[in-house]
Amino acid sequence: MKMPMTLRPREHRLAFVATVIIATWGAVSWGVQPLWDKTRELKDHLETQTGRLNAVGDLLEHAAAIDEEHQQIAPYLSQEDEEGSAFLHALEAISRRASVQLNLKPHPVKREERLSRFEVELDVEGAQDRLLVFLDELLRMPTLLTIERLRISSVSGKERSLRANLVVQKLTLIR
């Protein structure tokens, strides 16, 4: 029969130290480290939510100013009919007020991701001062516009009369 193995005091201490080290490693790996990670994750989540809450609070403090700014740009965000007939009517009204002759050549609407472009080629003819009034009113319209091309030339045979050829794109932001 085999006798149970007995450990000398030094071996006994080494075994105890090894057991303590292994137990400590296990406690840290399976207990403390997951708790530490969870604590860090909750702290980050809390900071994010606090930042969001502060941002909402700032928005609420400035709600009146934000609403006023929105009212100022609201005409630029308006939806319009597919053919852009309201824009064409507005151009015709401007030409009547400016007393110039206007020819319109609308092009199909081009759609992009968040933007719609309605392009119109304009031929405008009239006295120099009246043509400038038309262009000024065109640029003051409460609409997002780009002028792709603008050519101004004199009309042969008519003194102080000009002809302008321009391509205007009306931009509509899609909500």
Image: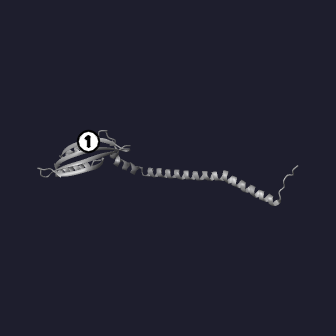
Q: Residue furthest right?
A: 1
> Residue drawn 29% across and 49% down?
146
> Residue drawn 22% across and 51% down?
151
At mark 1, the secondary structure is strand
Of residue 83 and residue 111, the one placed in the foreground of this image is: 111
In the image, residue 173 lies at what x, y percent?
35, 45
In the image, residue 108 lies at what x, y percent?
29, 40
The reply to whether residue 110 is in sight is yes
For badge 1, the amino acid type reads: Pro
The reply to whether residue 139 is in sight is no
Q: Residue furthest left?
A: 157
Of residue 80 and residue 59, the one placed in the foreground of this image is: 80
Q: Residue furthest front?
A: 1
Q: Is residue 16 left or right of residue 83?
A: right
Vertically, is 160 above or below 86? below
Q: Which residue is mark 1?
A: 106
Of residue 129 and residue 149, the one placed in the foreground of this image is: 149
> Residue drawn 55% across and 52% down?
44
In the image, residue 7 lies at what x, y percent?
83, 57
Q: Residues within 10 Å of mark 1 (few under 14, many from 20)?
A: some
Q: Quadrant of residue 101?
A: top left
In the image, residue 56 lies at what x, y percent?
47, 50
